[in-house]
Each structure stands twice: as structure tokens, then as C-alpha cells.
Image (cartoon, helix red, strand yellow):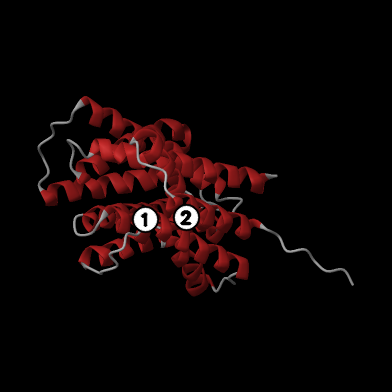
Amino acid sequence: MKKYLGILGLLTVTIIWGGGFVASDMALETLTPFQIMTVRFFIAAVLMTLLGGKQLRTIKKEEIKCGFWLGTALFAAFALQIIGLQYTTPSKNAFLTATNVVFVPFIALVIYKKKIETRSLIGAGMAIIGAGVLSLQSDFSVNPGDGLTLLCAVGFAFQIFLTGEFVGRIRPSVLNFLQMATACILSVIGLFVSGEFHFAPSMKSILAVLYLGVVSTTVCYLLQTVSQKYVDETKSAIILSMEAVFGTVFSVILLDEKVTMRMLLGSALILSAVLISEIQPKKIKA
């Protein structure tokens, strides 16, 4: 029962993250990437402080270490994604980010020698094909932005993998507070390095970044952390690839994008990947 609640929690995260594509597009109208990252992670850190309450008074050394590595992976993923987006197309950026679903099981294999289930590999492959059908255009050329975005996918893969490893022994509220605090501090450093000091946000951008900070970051990453207690990291990555589907759905609803056969096919492939990764093979009785 807890496993299915975990799957439901991860699916909820993908729905909210799908709406986050629209919110990010709105926020970028008058805010720079590092400004958005700084504000969203600051909001998340403050809210996690309130939610953590008394637990944050007894933070242990091991928890600080785990939270630091998790927050560093999260910051690196977002930063590389934003920088890469400046040198490649949004569709290729979205597709290459989604390749984190392939990296997760191999990270688990290399670090902890975890066996990769065949159906998980099939599901990961189908999710990548589905994301490619959804995102890629006819131009398959490679540029520096593509390389940076691939590194961003590795960052997200490590974030998913480390969450699965840490959540079994670290309190979720403490882990998320430290993750968001670390990402916020690193975002502030990035803000100073980039020199993006001039803030002149519109009301639309303010509302969008509030959504990103409160819902898309605080709620989602807390829900992801709790859900991954019951779903392993490889299956979690496959389920989280549904973000591409819901991003397309919200783009159609809110940004008036036209529904195409490619959208339907790509979404069907990703949904099939999630289902295949969760199908338990029947044991043949002697």
C-alpha cells in the first residue's frame, strides 16, 4: 500500500512540475535565471524552516553532510540547465534533461553495485524515446549547450539517486531544509558571479516565482523525498519522466499550443514506460 502511495506522490510531483514550465516561462519575462533560482530556493528554505520546527534544533553532522551533497546536486542541475539553454533550443534542452532517467540506474550500479532489472531498463529506454518524440525537432546538430544540458541531466540523476539513498536514514524535513539552504546559498553566489543585481519584476513574474518557490520547490521536493522511501531510485526516475507529458498538457491548456500526433505518441510512450517499470512478472508455478 505504501509503495502505491509513493507512486501516487511522485505522479503528483510530475503534474506540479509540468505546470512549473509555464511558471518559469512567465518568470523569465522580467527576471534572470539566477534571480529566479535565488528567490525560489530562499522561499523554499524559509518554508522548510517553519515546517521543520524543533527537528532543526538537533541537526546532526551526518545530516549536514547529506543535505549539502543533495543541495549541491540540485543547484548544479538547475544552473547547468539554465546556462545550457542559452546555447541550445528549449526542445533539445527538455529532451536532454529527461535523459536523467537513463543515468540513475547506472549510478546505482557503479556506486553500490545494485542490479538493474530488465523491465526498468526497458522502461528507461521507452521514456527517453518518448521524451525525444515530444521534444526533438528535425535539427539533431550538437553544440556546447547540448553538452552542458547533458551534465545537467547527470545532476538531476544524482539528486534522485541521493534522495533515495539518504531518505532511509535522514529525517525528510531536515534533509529538505539542508538541501534548499545549500541550493539557496550557491544560487546567491551564482547571482554575484553573474552580476545579475538589478531586480525589476512584473506582477506576473512575482506570482510565477512564488508558485515556483512554494509549490514547485517546497511542496514537490518534500513530497518527492517522502515518496522515495517506498519507491526505488530507478523507478522513481521513470515515473518523474512523466513531467515532460504534463509540461506538454499545460502548454496546450495555458499557452494555446496545438495538439499534434507527435505529442500524443510521445506521451503514450512515456506512460507505457511507467507502466512497464511497475508490472510485476508472474511467477510460473511448478
Q: Is residue 173 above or below residue 126?
A: above
> Residues under labels 1 and 2: Cα distance?
9 Å
Name which residue type carries label 1.
Ser
Q: What element carries label 1?
A: helix
Tell me where residue 220 sits by quadrant. Answer: top left
Residue lying furthest front = 261
**Left of 82 or right of it: where is 165?**
right
Q: Is mark 2 on a helix, strand or loop?
A: helix
Relative to the observer, which residue lies in front, 99 or 136? 136
Q: Is residue 58 visible?
A: no
Q: Are marks 1 and 2 in contact (CB under 8 Å)?
A: yes
> What residue is shown with label 1?
135
Which residue corresponds to the image point at 45% horizontal and 36% vertical from the top-left? Answer: 219
**Left of 140 or right of it: where is 174?**
right
Q: In the rendering, which numbered label is found on residue 266?
A: 2
Which residue corresponds to the image point at 55% horizontal and 50% vertical from the top-left? Answer: 228
Q: Position of residue 10 (x, y in %)?
A: 53, 46
Name which residue type carries label 2.
Gly
Circle 2 Cα neighbour tier, 10 Å, few/some/many (<14 / 14–19 / ≥20): many
Relative to the observer, which residue lies in front, 19 or 197? 19
Q: Position of residue 129 (x, y in %)?
A: 46, 63
Which residue corresponds to the image point at 21% horizontal and 45% vertical from the top-left? Answer: 33
Q: Position of residue 131 (x, y in %)?
A: 43, 57
Earlier-in-chain disc, 1 versus 2:
1
Q: In this view, does 105 lie above or below 18?
A: below
**Left of 236 or right of it: where is 157?**
left
